[in-house]
Image (cartoon, rainbow, N blue to C red):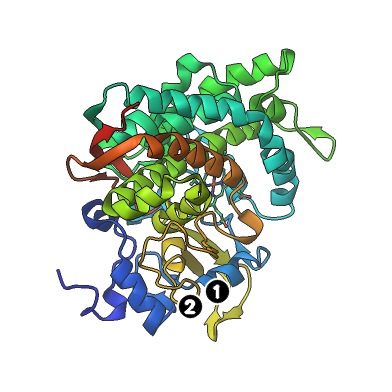
Amino acid sequence: MAAAAELPLDQLELLDPEIFLRSGYPHDAWRRLRHESPIHYFGSHHQPFWAITKHEDITTISKQPELFLNGPRLFLHPRVEEAQTEFDAIGGFERPKTLIEMDNPLHRANRKLISSRFTPAALKKIHSEVDRIARKFVDDMLVEEEGEVDFVEKIAAPLPIAVIGWLLGVPESDWMQLYDWTNRMLGFDDPEFAQGNDNEGAQAIIELFTYFTSLVEARKKDPKDDLITVFAHAEIDGQKLPLIDVLAWCQIIVSAGNETTRNATTGGMLALIEHPAERRKMAQAANLRSGIEEILRWTSPIIHFARTASADTVVGGHAIAEGDVVALFYPSANRDEDVFVDPYRFDVTRKPNRHLAFGVGEHFCAGAHVARLELEMAYKYLLPRLEEVELAGPPDRLRSNLVGGIKRLPIRFKAKRG
Ligand code: HEM
């Protein structure tokens, strides 16, 4: 296959999940687009779209939620059949839209339901719990002074599952079930998770809805201090949310909260292994927070989200017609030379760091503070205790054009003594 540098722009492949499986992010293609055609129309793609690759343009679009809608199409499917069928009807019923697929006024009314639960002040309450969970996973991994483990299995996957399970109020014995549903909902394009079934993602949603129905009923009768209770008793305009919308809330928290943080944690470890001097710097408490922001910029776990124009408009001198789809490539924005000094350098002391890993504007990630807290706790306990760490095998990547996932990261480590 020709390298990204030689191909005509129209032939650059940005959405084929095979690329992500084989070699990770197509940074060469994104760089060419940023330099040569930052708002580029891929008209012969089976779902024609505008590729938006620069920080400023992604920000401009994301801050106009009435003009650029989330509802009609949140992301671009890699295959024609999926573009036609989507998951819109599952198990004989219409799949309800989750927060991220809503537009105003519905979006703002819904987002208010959780905004107070996810502020840094509100999250102070969960610090000690996340701290306890993170320390336990790190202790478990470092039980031997040296060894080989899959970092995803030991730290990156169980930590967000535990935190999301705990926040929602899911019994600990069922946390692993959340893991399975997330893999199938977001990994529907990876043969390992799709298991040869085109509807595996939809099937996982049905199972998740069935499971949460009984928890929601229980919380209606017996409220607790957890998110299921918040959703079960939530009201919009004086009306209680119908059960199906309560279930959609549980779904978005499970799906948005797990895989993203897992992949930031895993991608962060890979970057720290590849940049040992930065790892040693980040082990110092003073560099922890800036190191987390750099990991978020560097890994940028969401590859793209799409918006649909609600009217004819112009962005960066390009006429975008009503109904046109724009794809926002966050990892490209996070290497934008106009925003970041030396963007291809992994620098845990980078400041400022205005990355777009969590998006921007109306739909800015509702769980950003939770994710930062989890990453902070994981690395705070892990890094100072690692003497050495290296890859024990190649990363096993997820086949997806939506989430930049690493399914397994074999590492060899030596812990510090004492
Ligand atoms: C490193 C981890 C994470 C990353 C990279 C990430 C990334 C994102 C991105 C890019 C968006 C869309 C923003 C936009 O369209 O402008 C988003 C939305 C969202 N995220 Fe996250 N996320 C992470 C963790 C979490 C966690 C832990 C939770 C829940 C506890 C969460 C819940 C949500 C929700 C509910 C939305 C929809 C917000 C809305 O539409 O108003 N995310 N996230």
At x 54% / y 29%, what residue is drawn? 131
Please tell me which of labels 1 and 2 falls first in the chain. 1
At x 28% / y 72%, what residue is drawn? 12
Location of residue 307 by image quarter: bottom right
Q: Are marks 1 and 2 in contact (CB under 8 Å)?
A: yes
Q: What crowding class fits label 1: few (fewer than 14 Cα within 10 Å), some (14-19), or many (20 or more)? A: some
Count of numbered badges drawn on the protein: 2
- Position of residue 144 relative to residue 25, above or below, is above
Q: Is residue 47 left or right of residue 315?
A: left
Q: Quadrant of the C terminus?
A: top left
- Note whether residue 335 is visible: yes
Give the number of the mark in front: 1 or 2. Answer: 2
| Residue furthest out toward the right | 238
Relative image position of residue 175 (x, y in whole percent) = 46, 22
Would you name the residue on which mark 1 appears?
56
Q: Quadrant of the N terminus?
A: bottom left
Would you name the residue on which mark 2 appears?
338
Q: Is residue 348 left or right of residue 125?
A: left
- Position of residue 334 relative to residue 117, above or below, is below
| Residue furthest out toward the front | 418
- Position of residue 212 relative to residue 279, above or below, is above
- Dot 1 beta carbon under 8 Å from ligand 1: no
Relative image position of residue 100 (x, y in whole percent) = 58, 49
